[in-house]
Amino acid sequence: MSRQIPISKQTSYQSIMHVIQQLHYSKIEAHVMMYLIYLIMSQGQYDQQAHDYFTFFNPQPLAKHDQVSLHTVKVAFKELLGHGDIRVNSRQHAKDQVFLVRFKVVKN
């Protein structure tokens, strides 16, 4: 059910992006993608002083909405890779989950 992603604290940003590029062609659950985003942020490439934030409400139920959530994450990572900045809003209907991802990647 859940996958082991071979990423450690020393894994580079480029390596993470490479893993993501491979994974988003397979059926992977949205919360695993969000975990990868979290790893990027926790490696010091997330600017905590910029008042940007990461909010994700109860990611597991999004698995049944793979197309919506994965598309959003894919767009987010395209922005991240191209511009070093992400703003993503996703509102789902009724009982479905709401999530917001907003952060900057600090250029070295």
Image: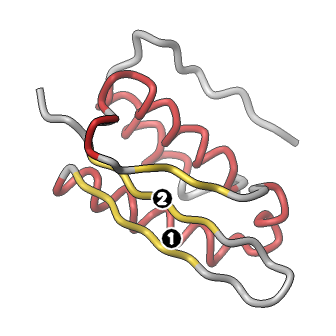
Q: Residue visible at 62% across and 78% down?
A: 68
Closer-to-camera residue (16/49): 49
* Residue 43, position as x, y percentages in the image: 39, 22
Secondary structure under tag 1 reads: helix
Please give left or right for residue 72 compared with residue 59 in the image: left
Q: Residue at x 50, y 50 (%)?
A: 54
- Is 60 located above or below residue 64 in the figure? above
Quadrant, the N terminus: top right
The 10 Å Cα crowd at callout 1, few under 14, some 14 to 19, many 20 or more, is some
Q: Tell me which amino acid carries mark 1.
A: Thr
Q: Which residue is mark 1?
A: 72
Which residue ends up furthest to the top in the rendered image? 10
Under circle 2, the secondary element is strand
Q: CA distance from mark 1 to mark 2?
A: 10 Å
| Crowd rating for badge 2 (residues with CA inside 10 Å; few <14, some 14–19, many 20+) | some
**Disc 2 marks which residue?**
101
Residue 11 horizontal side relative to residue 58, left or right = left
Q: Residue at x 52, y 72 (%)?
A: 71
